[in-house]
Amino acid sequence: MPIHGNIIQYDEKQHGLAMRLWQGCPTIAVTRGGRLFAGWYSGGSREPSVMNYNLLVESRDGGLTWSKPLFIIEGLPQKNIQVLDIQLWMDPLERLWVCWVQRDWTIRLDKPGHLSTWAVLCGSPDAEKLAFSEPVYLADGFLRCQPTALSDGRWLFCAYNWLHDSYAYYETSDEGRSFQTCKAGKRLGKPNFDESMILERRDGSLWMLARTVGIGQLAESISADGGRTWSGAFATTIPTPSTRFFLKRLKSGRVLLVNNHSSTVRNCMTAFLSEDDGRTWPHSLLLDPRETSYPDVAEDANGALYIVWDRGRTTFKEILIARISEEDILAGRLVDYASYQGHLIAKAPTPHINPEAEEIKARDKLWLDEIQKTAYP
């Protein structure tokens, strides 16, 4: 593919496993033809770092083996622009969106432009030779979750910011050619990492679930008029230890929720199914009892569910995947012969063996010290 702007070729010496002091926050997409794409976040010594980058890989055998990164999305250190999380999405037109967030450290947190979402698109993701568009700016805000396509043709991208006290998202009515910034309900608790997802219920209402901080349950906000007005947020009975979750209606009509089933610790990654638009969750399958985070899900044309998450971003440094079916969740155990759990996509060395680790940490510290002097004028 052509390389544009801050999208560069993968370099084993610079971006290989041995150079990753940490990695996490994965995302996944699957094409109509069954090709899987996964991406995640790494670079530098930690989050945040001006040396952070995103990477994109592919699998053509159902997630059992994965390619080297197809390309790298890096920040612009000379401009104090940090690259943040990657998010993949297959839109209703079967185009692959590779979205990411940029953070401009020269702009205050509470000012427009501090956070912005960008994307490249691939119109034929099943082609032997992939072709992506040039990077395009979508809107201000921090996108960490998959968008939602509504039945009326609108697409909703939940991207939070720190500009006001309401949950933020933006929508497009023209298949991604233009975007409008919108507000949902007033936040529950203090604003922080307000990752949210929206489900269109069978009665036409929109149900937003959102991450909270220090509350122990997901928040919800509801719109009965297509998003023109929203209720203020209030706590659900769904536990969360303050982390990302996943929510989506499946091809069967059931609703899938994947989250850390705990109010305090990022463990017990679990898949739940609801038959009544999220009012109850009678079916569940424990995916990983260990400390894990940040699930993302893709459903293929045959209904198989591919779920990714991370484990120990700075310790175990694992990116993991499961392939399960709704039948597995209904049974509470793996019953599908093609299902698997906890398969590694990537694992960086631990303990770390990179002789340049201390230099990377020193560069990050120097950058953070300088940012404290110059950022947020």
Image (cartoon, rainbow, N blue to C red):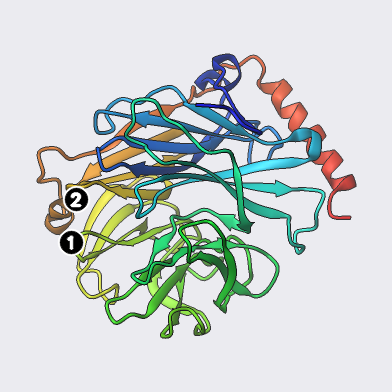
Q: What is the three-letter code of the residue carrying label 2? A: Gly
Quote the CA–CA distance across marks 2 and 1: 8 Å
In the figure, residue 262 lies in which quadrant? bottom left
Q: Is residue 145 above or below residue 69?
A: below
Question: In screen coordinates, is 10 left or right of 246?
Answer: right
Question: Visible in this render: residue 303?
Answer: yes
Q: Residue at x 78, y 48 (%)?
A: 105
Q: Residue at x 58, y 21 (%)?
A: 19
Q: Residue 153 placed where, x, y %?
A: 39, 67
Q: Count neighbours of disc 1 (C-alpha within 10 A) and say few if under 14, some if 14 to 19, many if 20 or more.
A: few
The residue beneath circle 2 is 303
Q: What is the three-letter code of the residue carrying label 1? A: Ser
The residue beneath circle 1 is 252
* Dot 1: element: loop
Q: Is residue 245 above or below residue 362?
A: below
Q: Nearer the viewer, residue 358 or 376?
A: 376
